[in-house]
Image (cartoon, rainbow, N blue to C red):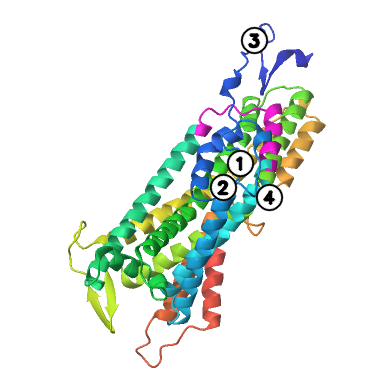
Amino acid sequence: MRQKLFKRNMAFWIPVNKNKVHVSKVKPRHNIVTFQKALRATVIVGQAFSLIPFVGVFTNDANDVKFVRTSWKCVYSLMSLFGQMFMTVLCISKLAKTTISLNGTSPVIFYVTTCVTMMMFYQVARRWPELVQHISKAEEIDPNFDSHLTRKCNITCGIVLFLALMEHILSLLSAFAGAAVCNANMDTYEGFVRHFYPWVFNFIPYSMILGLVTQFLHFQSTFIWNFSDLFVICMSYYLTSRMKQVNKKLLAAQGKYLPEVFWKTTREDYCRATQIVRKVDDVINGIVFISFTNNLFFICLQLFNTLEDGLKGTGECSSKNKKIVVPKTGPLGGHEAATYFLFSLVYLLSRSVAVSLIASQVNSASSVPAPVLYDVPSPVYCIEVQRFLDQVNGDKVALSGLQFFSVTKGLLLTVAGTIVTYELVMFQFKTPTPQLNTTTPTLSSIYNVTSTLGALVT
């Protein structure tokens, strides 16, 4: 009898009045948002920087998405990878001939992580056709009607790329301002590339072609670093949208007397959504890991430099053990270095927080059904509701970094605690000891600081 009080419409069970039957309009097929449509712009940007080299980005048919090793996209990706490896080897060679320092190792870590990221995206491309087909089968059963999903991904893509371009332009202005004094006797472009890429031209004679190739590889690695975060954000948008579609049906039915078949159908929809999350995580968990670890390192590095030396309004260069300060000239009045440093720090912090919060929404959305299921009236409580509750409370649905950590809201506090711990430990080692009775940091003191911060975070 109760089943007559409900109508099934593609994605929703709609409760209706006993005396008046309401028939909802079927949503048109053109309102359906597929995984390929939502991520198309993001994937095109990635392929422009030699990432995710699969064939069929413009198709709407999952069967046309293929990974072809002999395609020009794979060739472009492999050539770019060899170029980044070339830069990495030169950075390591320069580091081996100088005093090892934290700032000196940053170019090496930057290019090493770029190479690792490119290899991980190559593996993602190999598994991309299988992922698209799996999601397409789920979308045929339970289509996604989130009309704002594609726009949200495209707007985020535009914002991240614009800010990344601004950061790169400011870095170039800072380098040109420094090169104008440090290499004043050279041609403008030659002085710039020698000042900005010393690990290349300390070993290889300068040429215009090599300078352009080096600058392109650096530009490419900068955007690859930003694209990792953008890719995680857009994938999280899609997964959260899938979970929210199930939650919308549950919230509309909270506290109502619904038949067992409703809970069975909704539980199956929830299962499909969680299976998509696990499938996506299995493919991109390496990208999530490299994104979080890379951001953590460079946040620690920039915060340490800021706390130790402050914001430098002028650039500096060394010449025979003597520092030359760049005069206040140039488009930003000699403050190019400080402007770039401040913008880069704020942008890096904002982007890292955004990745953490947006990716954690997948986990947050997966826990929404629990309060609704606890609120099911006793007369209609059934085995399907109990199974649904067991699944929601027993499974942890979230993106992860190579299964080492799960991206939840609590992860942001854990990362913040790690950063504070790092800064305190580094300053204990860097603090001068003018008095004889001043104690130097020991392993026990470092352990005590770490334990105290860990207890505060948890």
In this view, the residue in front, 206 or 246, is 206
Using the numbered discs, state the Cα–Cα distance from disc 3 to disc 1 in whole angstroms: 46 Å
Quick check: marks 2 and 1 in contact, CB under 8 Å?
yes
Using the numbered discs, state the Cα–Cα distance from disc 3 to disc 4 in whole angstroms: 42 Å
Give the percent coordinates (x, y) of residue 321.
Answer: 29, 84
Numbered mark located on residue 73 in the image: 2
Using the numbered discs, state the Cα–Cα distance from disc 2 to disc 3 in whole angstroms: 52 Å
In this view, the residue in front, 146 or 172, is 172
Q: Is residue 399 visible?
A: no
Residue behind mark 3? 22
Mark 3 or 1, nearer chain start: 3
Image check: 194 left or right of 75? left
**Which three-letter amino acid code belongs to the residue tagged 4?**
Asp
**Which three-letter amino acid code belongs to the residue tagged 2?**
Lys
**Which three-letter amino acid code belongs to the residue tagged 1?**
Val
- Mark 3 Cα-neighbour bin, 10 Å: few <14, some 14–19, many ≥20: some
Give the percent coordinates (x, y) of residue 14.
Answer: 66, 18
Residue behind mark 4? 282
Residue behind mark 1? 55
